[in-house]
Amino acid sequence: MSAWTLSELICAVLGYICGLILLIGPNIRKRSNPQWVLRALSLSGLFVIAWATTIIIKIYGDSFLTSKTLNLVKQYKPLFGGVTIGILITLFMSGELSFKKWKRKR
């Protein structure tokens, strides 16, 4: 296993962990956040899990996927990552994920 493959595998595992945190985390405590914020965080969690899944498919799919399908999987990886980053930037810029707001609520 090369160093690039190992680093991609570590990113995929971290992606699964962060995706589960984003998916489950907002629903654990009842907060006064608007409903769209909770849905956006859950959606970004799903996209992070999909991004990590495309990494795993890219690493281990060489043996059973055709080159055309593997190229399609490689094209979806930046799509999932970009949508996730876009959602999180939107939430930060709207002020719903600001650190000041978190400190006031605790």
Image (cartoon, helix red, strand yellow):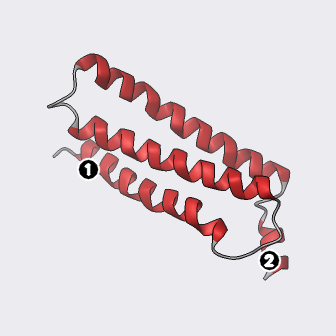
Tag 1: amino acid: Leu
**Above/below status of 71 relative to 18:** above
Q: Few, some or many C-alpha atoms within 10 Å of disc 1 (few <14, some 14-19, many ≥20)?
A: few
> Dot 2 corresponds to which residue?
103
Q: Mark 1 falls on what kind of element?
A: helix
Which residue of the protein is positioned furthest toward the top in this rendering? Answer: 68
Report the label total. 2
| In this picture, residue 35 sits left or right of residue 76 | right
Binning the other alpha carbons within 10 Å of mark 2 as few (below 14), some (14 to 19) or many (20 upward) gives few
Residue 104 x %, y %: 85, 78
- Residue 75 location, quadrant: top left
Element marked by disc 2: helix
Label 2, label 1: how far apart the Cα atoms are:
37 Å
Q: Which mark is residue 6?
A: 1
Q: Amino acid at mark 2?
A: Lys
- Residue 12 at what x, y percent from top left? 37, 51
In this view, 71 is above or below 83: above
**Relative to 46, is 27 on the left or the right?**
right
Give the residue at x 77% y 68%.
99
> Residue visible at 45% across and 43% down?
50
Q: Position of residue 57 (x, y in %)?
A: 29, 38
Q: Nearer the viewer, residue 43 or 55?
A: 43
- Give the residue displayed 50% in from the left and 61% down from the top: 20
Quadrant placement of the C terminus: bottom right
Q: Residue 33: x and y, percent?
A: 81, 65
User: In the picture shown, does residue 12 fall above or below 26?
Assistant: above
Q: Nearer the viewer, residue 23 or 18?
A: 23
Q: Residue at image x 36%, y 57%?
A: 13
**Comes first in the chain, label 2 or label 1:** 1
Write down the quadrant of residue 105 in the picture.
Answer: bottom right
